[in-house]
Image (cartoon, rainbow, N blue to C red):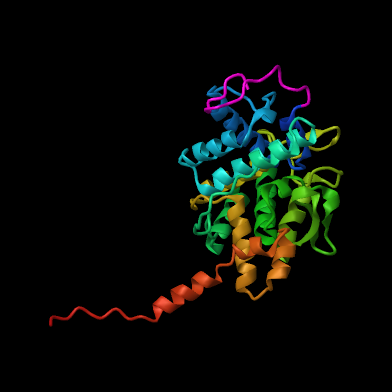
Amino acid sequence: MDALALPGAPEPPGPPPAADPCRAYLDSLTGAESRRTMAGCLDRIARILTGDPAASAHGQPWHLLRYEHTVRLRALLAGQGWSPAHVNKHLVALRRVLREAWRLGQMTAEDYQRAADLPTLRHTRLPAGSHVPPEAVAAVLAACEDAPGPAGLRDGAVVAVLYSTGCRRAEIAGLTLADYDPGARSLRVRGKRDRERLAYLTGAAVARLERWLAVRGMTAGALFCPIGRTGRLRHRDGAPARMTGQAVADILTRRLAEAGAARRTPHDFRRTFIGELLDAGVDLATAQALVGHASPATTARYDRRPEHRRREAVDRLVLPEARPL
């Protein structure tokens, strides 16, 4: 790097290698949102390393980093005031780009192992996000029904699918008409690392989806597509165009505001779906399969039952009435 803002940085012997480990790492990620997220992490790391607020992760000589630099960088990241989980995400990005530098032959195995030997920040936090109460969902669906034009039908179907499947917002955006099987009431969902699974819809969700499809039509393409201000469905190459995950989040934000409900995110719907399943007695392995988690430990973090039991335990206490001694 031209001017690392870390003490003891080696002077680069020449320009960065032609092969860019940052590009190699980002190209290895299958999801557009994952690429965008990790590119942001690497850009922030590059700005800290160089002291340049406009620095980009691309073209930086990551192969020059050694353990004395990465351990200092870890300390600087921890001092940014970010949450431990956010810092750890940046450390993951750093380790992965160093691994690509090694794979490209730009670092020795020993230099890579030493530089990447960075422990994550340990932390214990209450689960993020919030539960979505049924009355909030009902209010949002009512707001969608009151909306004029096809956007209300589309948004009502999006909310219903979010609530009854627990899909991630990028998974909703990536659905196509071919993924929908009305007979089985299922959706073929492509999750992280291109893992496929089947998600199942409630009868009410199917009804809302069918109402949307009556307007969308049965042309092959994205299941949910953008809609212009005039109410015209947007197409690309003759097929309904694909939405982005951010567009799904924006739909939810807008309809919640119209309903007068508290702000929620698509991931809050996912948390609620998992919590409702576990509360209903569905076993952890089934819940894990339905939401596409790679590990049951991830699904277990969404379990609200221990909190329920603690609250019920406290409810057994009786606060004495005020009475003079």
Residue 131, above or below 325: above
In this view, the residue farthest toward the front is: 110
Q: Residue at x 63, y 71 (%)?
A: 278
Q: Residue at x 52, y 48 (%)?
A: 84
Magenta region, residue range: 1-19
Q: Position of residue 20 (x, y in %)?
A: 75, 27
In this view, the residue farthest toward the top is: 14
Q: Residue at x 54, y 22 (%)?
A: 52
Q: Which quarter of the rendering shows the C terminus?
A: bottom left
Q: Position of residue 101 (x, y in %)?
A: 74, 33
Residue 205 can be seen, yes or no: yes
Residue toward you, 21 or 247: 21
Residue 272, above or below 308: above
The secondary structure that most of the magenta stretch takes on is loop
- Which image quadrant for residue 280? bottom right
Q: Which quarter of the rendering shows the N terminus?
A: top right
Residue toward you, 228 or 104: 104
Magenta stretch: residue 132 in it?
A: no
Q: Is residue 112 left or right of residue 48?
A: right
